[in-house]
Amino acid sequence: MTLSFTITEIFASIQGESSFAGLPCTFIRLTGCPLRCNWCDTAYGFENGTLMSADDILGKVNELSPKIVEFTGGEPLGQSGVPALMKMFVEKGYQVLLETSGAVAIDAVPQEAHIIMDIKCPGSGMDSRNLWPNLDYLKASDEIKFVIASYADFEWALNVVHEFNLEKRFKLLFSPAWGLVKEKDLSAWVLDSGIDCRLNLQLHKYIWGPRVKGV
């Protein structure tokens, strides 16, 4: 049976976040998300979209030049069969990234895929949806991202880092929620805390602006 997926958009751009920031990347944005974060910047991907077969998705990506492919959303794992689609791209020689909310099980994600997983802070309104067993399926090379909407969020994130010993287990990213926390303030908090992490700015928003789609 041919796998099909509902796709919001497929495009080539500069990877804006994570340790891959600045690299050319092809994005596959899948439609739908079970969460409604207060600071969400991709609400346009919650519904509608275009039904595409796995072969059509591969063909569209092949038309674009970047060999890094990122599965994003919404929440890409909200559609069944996405791990199999990711495996298809791995087998075609693509470097595969997955950006996921952390609210959906990641145990079926191919080991070759690089996972960038959110842990939702209270400021998102979705912290009750964090699926903590996902931490047991992450690899040491994977990344955990905290989007910080206030100093209270930052303190909460530090407590989580210490509780689960995340600093010694994974790469950590701290991102200011756009328009809610100033970059210089989060930088100061990070420096004062002494935590081993990367300040994670949304590079694409600085290049094209915060409301432009398809970048």
Image (cartoon, helix red, strand yellow):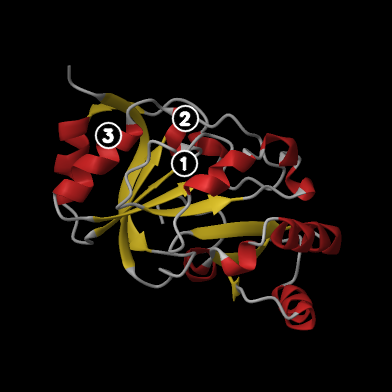
Image marks 3 and 1: residues in contact by CB distance under 8 Å: no
Q: Residues within 10 Å of mark 2 (few under 14, many from 20)?
A: some
Badge number at residue 84:
3
Instruction: Report which residue position mark 1 lands on.
Output: 73
Residue type at mark 2 is: Gly
Secondary structure type for disc 1: loop
Tell us which disc is closer to us: 3 or 1: 3
Q: Identify the mark nearer the N-term, 3 or 1.
A: 1
Neighbourhood count class around disc 3 (C-alpha, 10 Å): few under 14, some 14–19, many 20 upward: some
For label 1, the crowd category at 10 Å Cα-Cα, with few meaning under 14, some 14 to 19 and many 20 or more, is: many
Identify the residue at image location x=53%, y=63%: 170
Residue found 59% across the figure and 37% down from its top? 103
Mark 2 sits on what residue?
Answer: 78
Labels 1 and 2 touching (C-beta < 8 A): yes
Instruction: Estimate the x, y position of residue 70 in percent, counting from the top left.
Output: 35, 52
Residue 146, quarter of picture: bottom right
Please tell me whether residue 38 is drawn above or below residue 46 in the rendered image: below
Residue type for callout 3? Ala
Mark 3 or mark 2: name the one nearer the start of the chain. 2
CA gap, disc 1 to disc 2? 9 Å
Q: CA distance from mark 3 to mark 2?
A: 13 Å
Identity, as a three-letter code, of the amino acid under mark 1: Gly
What residue is rendered at 45% in x and 70% in y? 19
The answer to which image quadrant residue 95 occupies is: bottom left
Of labels 1 and 2, earlier in sequence is: 1
> Residue 69: which quarter of the image?
bottom left
Q: Position of residue 209 (x, y in %)?
A: 54, 63
The answer to whether residue 34 is visible is yes
Task: For residue 149, say whether it is visible.
Answer: no
